[in-house]
Image: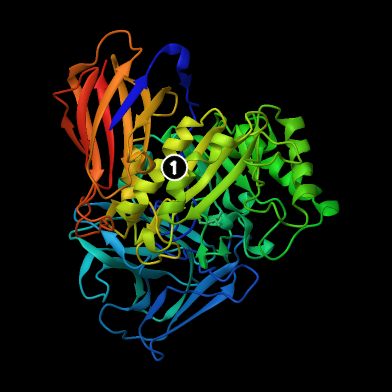
Amino acid sequence: ASLSVDASPILARKIPDTLFGMFFEEINHAGAGGIWAELVSNRGFEAGGPHTPSNIDPWSIIGDDSSIFVGTERISCFSRNMVALRMEILCDSCPVGGVGIYNPGFWGMNIEDGKTYNLVMHVKSPKTTELTVSLTSSDGLHILASAVVRVSDTSNWIKLDQTLVSRGTDRTSRLQITANKKGVVWLDQVSLMPSDTYKGHGFRTELISMLLDLKPRFLRFPGGCFVEGSWLRNAFRWRDSIGPWEERPGHYGDVWNYWTDDGLGYYEFLQLSEDLGAAPVWVFNNGISHHDEVDTAAIAPFVKDILDSLEFARGSTESKWGSVRAAMGHPEPFPVKHVAIGNEDCGKKNYRGNYLKFYNAIREAYPDIQMISNCDGSSTPLDHPADLYDFHIYTDSKALFSMRNTFDKTSRNGPKAFVSEYAVTGNDAGRGSLLASLAEAAFLIGLEKNSDVVQMASYAPLFVNDNDQTWNPDAIVFNSWQQYGTPSYWMQKLFRESSGAMIHAVTVNSSYSGLLAASAITWHDNENSFLRVKIVNFGPDAVSLTISTTGIESSVNALGSTATVLTSGEVMDENSFTNPNKIVPVTVELRNAADVMQVTLPPHSFSAFDLAL
Ligand code: AHR
């Protein structure tokens, strides 16, 4: 079999700078209990929502009916989240260790030896009181860190800050707040953050580094269905997710079925984009959820709300919303250049009507913002104006492999495609199989080749907390303290250099060509240039291949050339917490690299040959 690359400049084309990015959705506890490092779950005792009877879950009580009574009251000093916890300590001689409450975090808090944790809580008590705050094992028996805090103001809510330094490691710890004297204490907005979050911005460092390693060029956020809500009243609302964390009401995400305190809010998503060096792509609710819709005649306030969100991101510090952003610590604007008007709503009754209202208002106020329609324009032209259209695909591995040619037939005029969600799903995917990653790699090769009409692409979903796998598979699996990439994560690493690179013409001659997908790019690393030939071998046989290169200025240099392969013994192999690196790209020197060279593609493999130029 042979593969020839013609790298003549006349046949080369630049791939868009934004081609490969990421889609972050608050799903599978990706944010709350995930990349957002907050350890307390339901920090305001508000789960259930500000307008429903409060639910304090997962807070639990330490003590029995004779020693403590715990309830909630709408008495907080925070007007947008009025529910506070009332603890009435009934015992005079309380049990050893006191009585009170504990929070297990998100399936246990990861507390590590020698690390510092910052506790903040808001407290009110009609008489001087002492509270013990501790980090303990899940049964409360082993204390990792402890301090006594004093409530001495007996008429106002007070904010208490306390650092706790752990003297041990426990992956399933809890936070306890206890007292041992009769009295009443109200508690609200209790937060426990590790002190070592990424740049102090609140993100879990080891999860951020997995994202940084893929060099995403954009970040689409915060969903997905999370943006829509099952019902409009439970959709993500940016305005409720900004400002001081204590004042955010939080909300119940009714599609993926969990409460979020919205510590990871609109501002933090913009900050996350900046920290990743990725262009922010703000997906907003367009007045449509899964089950209800705002009529186009009544959509004006929603449009105004989104214009305000753009002023928040981009406005000067003198503007109303830009000044709120500045007060939060970011006087410089965030460069929002892309917005998606809704998610997967194309078929809905009011979509076109609502869409046009948003589109026209945003175009007028921010002419440079690229707008993304939910309607697929890959085979038929859109019936409304757009800069890009969303394309989502979840299917089996054979179907996705064969979709590598999908955009070959797309009209070269009109809006560009944003493949904002793609993945192999179903039986072929396992919990993240090699097979899935191979089909996805072939699909992405097709996108690279069609990147004159495909401008952006992202895998979905990005994250899963192993304790709440609502959606399977996902790119990064984690728990309170571990994480690993599925093969779909690692496959993306071999596309990391593609955005902004030059793509070249490739011809494959082989009886296996129906099972191969290949592309070639040139890319640069400091002063070094490489021709990268990527090939997916989707079949069960090894393929011996002659790769020949023409059209380059000088010859291929063996020195500095490498071959990287993603493969495994079985096509359904997966990574796991116990074997996180079973399937990862392996790089070796390519000593026989030359203008014409012989390589072998292992069965079921994805190879990248980096030929030094
Ligand atoms: O990625 C998971 C979900 O799939 C997204 O929320 C939605 O857009 C799609 O249906």
Q: Is residue 412 left or right of residue 168?
A: right
- Residue located 48% across and 33% down the image: 19
The residue that label 1 is drawn on is 443
Quadrant that contains the C terminus: top left
Q: Position of residue 435 (x, y in %)?
A: 33, 53
- Amino acid type shown at disc 1: Phe
Residue 513 position, x and y percent, is 36, 38
Image: 201 above or below 234: above
Q: Residue furthest right?
A: 297
Nearest to the observer: residue 218 or residue 603: 603
Whether the residue under disc 1 has CB within 8 Å of ligand 1: no
The x, y position of residue 180, in whole percent, is: 33, 78
Check the image and report above or below for 599 versus 137: above
Question: x, y percentage for residue 337?
Answer: 60, 32
- The foreground one among 479 and 445 is 445
| In-front residue for pair 185/606 | 606
Estimate how packed mark 1 is, as few (under 14), some (14 to 19) or many (20 or more) residues with alpha carbons within 10 Å: many
Image quadrant holding the N terminus, namely: top left
Considering every residue shown, the one lying at the far left of the view is: 591
Left/right of residue 469 with respect to residue 163 in the rendered view: right
Q: Say if residue 327 shows up in the picture.
A: no
Q: Tell whether 33 sits left or right of 227.
A: left
Against 45, residue 163 (above or below) is above
